[in-house]
Image (cartoon, coloured by chain):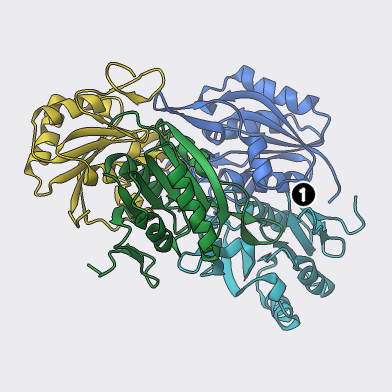
Chain colours: A blue, B cyan, C yellow, D green
Amino acid sequence: MDQTSLRILVTGGTFDKDYHELEGRLFFRATHVPEMLRLGRCRVGVVVEPLMLIDSLEMTDADRARVLAACRGASEERIVITHGTDTMELTARVVGAAKLAKTIVLTGAMVPYTFGSSDGLFNLGGALAFAQALPHGTYVAMNGRCLGWDNVRKNKSTGVFEPHEGE
Amino acid sequence: MDQTSLRILVTGGTFDKDYHELEGRLFFRATHVPEMLRLGRCRVGVVVEPLMLIDSLEMTDADRARVLAACRGASEERIVITHGTDTMELTARVVGAAKLAKTIVLTGAMVPYTFGSSDGLFNLGGALAFAQALPHGTYVAMNGRCLGWDNVRKNKSTGVFEPHEGE
Amino acid sequence: MDQTSLRILVTGGTFDKDYHELEGRLFFRATHVPEMLRLGRCRVGVVVEPLMLIDSLEMTDADRARVLAACRGASEERIVITHGTDTMELTARVVGAAKLAKTIVLTGAMVPYTFGSSDGLFNLGGALAFAQALPHGTYVAMNGRCLGWDNVRKNKSTGVFEPHEGE
Amino acid sequence: MDQTSLRILVTGGTFDKDYHELEGRLFFRATHVPEMLRLGRCRVGVVVEPLMLIDSLEMTDADRARVLAACRGASEERIVITHGTDTMELTARVVGAAKLAKTIVLTGAMVPYTFGSSDGLFNLGGALAFAQALPHGTYVAMNGRCLGWDNVRKNKSTGVFEPHEGE
């Protein structure tokens, strides 16, 4: 494992949702990714680039094109994309179909990081590891697993990411 | 990434320390690894095997031999060992020198999981990922990185795991 | 301070909101009050009575009448009501105007208990104390203070509870 | 309830213990009381005065004399003392016997605030409330209750504070 540096592209999603005290609703204030890396005592060379802070249900084709462009333009060979879970598989397909000579891993969370029970730290740790260890390609890292971009879907009734044809 | 199942060998360490309310000190009650996998919404096939629950400063040669024997005896090809950080590099050397035909990843935490700011979830997510993605060998996964068993040490003044010869 | 037992009437509010993983929104599952009392190592004799689990913006006149009836019907002389903050002052007025021979304290939270940063534990501890120590009357206990039912309002722009005429 | 301001005298105790990452033990870094007041959205006028940061088992007669002197010298009529639980009853007796014309409430925690499951926020909320609502005297506020300085002891086997003669 060399000292390869990594880029984390932030798009928002449950990962980064905060609670708005005065309005009693969830919203985006700023990304929590740097704080999560600090909590994880992460010492990998990482550049965090916030692209957008949106719910993935609101992500447009133009947004996905922007994510792909950021992957293409990054000088790093290894990239993690934080993303809402609802349409993560769609963005994975857009990025994966481009067949860049990079290792790109999308990840997210079912529970906001600011809630104590978040799966975000677990997933972020996994995504950074997969991004360092896997060959070029585009993957989704959720639930401790890593699935290829053309063989992943979120099971809407369980919230679990699984291979497209089932298991 | 196939559906390979994994074994997690628990040895204790900071990971699993609890606070003893009546005595005001840290102690081991039981491993938190299953709860951490649940929080992480982990869906990898995992067997958790508690070997011991001790501070790694108290780990003896006999204990390390037991860890090695458990690695050797496991039917799984992919193994994660949770371990105190103080002597993790010693156990990595004992296991690594045996050159088993398995992928074995040691991990741990600087802060007990029961403290809110724990790096445990982040490290466990990373260790499970490295164990799935890396070729046979023995590794230490800490601080978001993965280092080979014969090239890792804990820097006592910073608490960071780094290559033996520095970087 | 005698061993007077207390009744906690639960109506919902931010206090009790949970995060719905599959739908990505806040909702009510069940009250967290018993768990909060356990965390607080509370040893006061307390009966927890869930009346409803609603957002206080949805509370109707009939709901408030039900809260008042529960206060009137309770065998305990000391009562805490957990309540959403948006209309807490309205319910306080309905209950307070009845001039029951009881000490009744309404409290709530700006942040759900399931979020790490909740003010709920702090407020619940305060409300139980005020309910034990104050003479008969109806009060709102928020922000570490206790204000009379006829002299309290929530400042919508700051989220702080203050005397009606300002300070 | 008027706008009486309060003084919080900090002496340390479990309340304020932190985890030392490099040494794997509990220690005192700085008091968490201001952060706890912020989390509790406390709007009572409070002055926080750190007197010492020690384990209450190490508290000497000289230390207790210093606590009493601080109570006597404070311009505020209402005082909360944060204190380790092991010898809280001893300090309560020293302060209580002085019969100052003030309301003085000692409180503490069984679990450090930095652990998620802390009873500290609950107790602090209660202590501030009792300090505002009770007549002059010295009290111990723990477990949701408030006991007089001459009738309180910590049950060493349960960790619960109870009246001296039992209940």
Letter of the chain that mark 1 sits on in the rendering: A
Type of amino acid at the residue the image marks with label 1:
Ala
**Residue drawn at x 74%, y 56% as measured from the top left:** B141
Q: Quadrant of residue C25?
A: top left
Does A147 appear above or below C55? below
Asked which secondary structure carries label 1, the reply is helix
For this rendering, which residue is in front, D125 or D23? D125
Residue C129 drawn above or below residue C141 = below
The residue sitting at the right extreme is B165
* Other residues around mark 1 within 10 Å, as few (<14) / some (14–19) / many (≥20): many
Q: Could you tell me residue D70's position as x and y percent?
A: 48, 46
Residue in front for this viewpoint, B135 or D69:
D69
Query: Which quadrant would residue D131 be assigned to in this image?
Result: top left
Q: State left or right for residue B65 relative to residue C163.
A: right
Up-down relation of residue C3 to residue B61 (above or below): above
Residue drawn at 38 percent across, 24 percent down = C159
In the visual, does D74 lie left or right of D143? right
Residue C13's spot in the image, x, y percent?
Answer: 30, 34
Query: Relative to residue A129, is residue B16 drawn left or right?
Result: left
The residue lying toward the viewer, choosing from D52 and A97, is D52
Residue positioned 66% across, 74% down in the render: B74
Q: Measured from the top left, where is residue C94 in percent x and y?
A: 13, 27
Please name the residue that numbered disc 1 is placed on.
A133
- Residue A157 position within the rendered picture, expressed as x and y whole percent measured from the top left: 42, 42
